[in-house]
Image (tube, grey):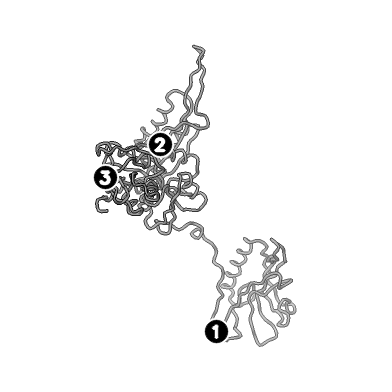
Amino acid sequence: MALKIGFFSADKFQSGAVLCHTTSSSSSKQALAIFYRPCYSLNRRRGRVLFLCRSQLDCNNPAKPNGHANHSFLAAGRGSDWQASCAILAGQALENGNNNGVGIVPVKSAENSSDANTILAPLPKPLSITDLAPAPMHGSHLRVAYQGVPGAYSEAAATKAYPSCEPIPCDQFEVAFQAVELWISDRAVLPVENSLGGSIHRNYDLLLRHSLHIVGEVQFPVHHCLLALPGVKPENLRRVISHPQALAQCENTLTLMGLNVAREAFDDTAGAAEFVAANNLRDTGSIASARAAEIYGMNILADGIQDDVGNVTRFVMLAREPVIPRTDRPFKTSIVFAHEEGTGVLFKVLSAFAFRNINLTKIESRPQRSKPVRVVDDLNGGTAKHFFEYIFYVDFEASMADPRAQNALAEVQEFTTFLRVLGSYPMDIAPLKRANSCSNH
């Protein structure tokens, strides 16, 4: 027994096509036929199902029923009706077997008449929700954007957040945001604050300007080294270049070393090392990582020159879609809001978290670019008072799946003119490990 299934386009048949058919010694075929009406879509002829029938068909003319055989018709004009019709057909086939009535009829094959061999042609599998949902990604085959060049601390943070990823260097923070939004990269790992230098305001402004979501955080210990070209001694240096925060984090150490050097800002730490090596600047040193020294062929003149050994930078991981909040592990939530005018409004906003025993880990204020100054008339003195308009960034230790956080934000919304959740994501609770020493390079 064999069941032959075929799909026919409208340009081959005018009134119908045989979907399943049998062969027998008689001059007729028993078949399940699809009759359709041709239609046009995007300059292609297609067929629309009109009805199904199980009938005796003439061998010489499969498209025409033979005589006045019993027909069982079933309308199937739309996609949903067609699915319902298939379900009815399958049910009746199981119910009635090979009896009369609508059903899919298993028949003898012309090639093999044995009933033991039943061949079903593969049908398209319907899409399910699992097919539409993206597969979980844990760092493998991920493209991760970061600001800087190879050897930057941001690259090391990206590989820590997503091991085995493909790091994509970007010359600016804005480019890293756009790389994710334009599907050039899957994630971005960008710094937001340092334990010595404080917040990186540029990225906080970009978080508000763009629509990406924070999906995680990673804390990376920073270990600075003083680099120079091979053969250059510390007393030969006349200037040191690096990122402004790196220069600030090593200011006291450079002074204690007795170096009479000018300190000049550069776009990033690894970029400074690359610039010195590319231009063969023998009177210029740079502050960067040990990996940057290895990549650009620099010598390490001093190891661990940061003023504080507890120098840690916090990076956030950004994606186009948020993660699903959970309560089975520690979560952190980041929000941004602008509060209403009035006395004590900010206190009321923050009290919504304090009353629910939710710990705040950060609060940052930034001036509103759209209206940085608000003027209020003083009715008593006839003068005008100028107030700065601020927006506030807040991080708190709770998941959005926690009812406490939901209730707190519901209360906050009553006192704010603008409120946005930047992300609710797992906290980085891994113990910090000191960065690899530079002395072995």
Residue 223 seen by the camera:
no
Mark 2, mark 3: which one is toward the viewer? 3
Question: Which residue is depicted at the point 38% across and 37% down?
Answer: 199
Disc 2, SS: strand
Between 333 and 376, the residue placed more toward the observer is 376
Q: Dot 1: within a 10 Å radius of its alpha carbon, few (fewer than 14), some, or many (20 or more) residues? A: few
| Vertical arrangement, residue 144 with respect to residue 76, above or below | above
- Picture quadrant where residue 141 is located: bottom left
Look at 37% across and 53% down and name the residue there.
159
Tag 3 secondary structure: loop
| Residue 153 x %, y % | 36, 48
The answer to whether the residues at label 1 and label 2 have Cβ atoms under 8 Å apart is no
> Residue shown at 41%/40% (left/top)?
334
Q: Earlier in the sequence, mark 1 or mark 3?
A: 1
Residue 423's x, y, as percent?
43, 44
Residue named by callout 3: 304
Q: Residue at x 32, y 47 (%)?
A: 228
Q: Which residue is mark 1?
A: 115
Q: Is residue 383 visible?
A: yes
1 vs 3, front mark = 3
Q: Is residue 62 left or right of residue 214?
A: right
Callout 1 secondary element: loop
Q: Are marks 2 and 3 in contact (CB under 8 Å)?
A: no
Extreme residue toward the top, this view: 381
Reading the image, the residue beneath label 2 is 394
Q: Earlier in the sequence, mark 1 or mark 2?
A: 1
The Cα atoms of the two marked residues, 1 and 2, are separated by 72 Å
89 over 254 or under it: above or below: below
**Separation of residues labelled 2 and 3 (CA atoms):** 32 Å
Instruction: Look at discs 1 and 2 and give the one toward the viewer.
Output: 2
Q: Amino acid at mark 1?
A: Asp
**Amino acid type, callout 3:** Gly
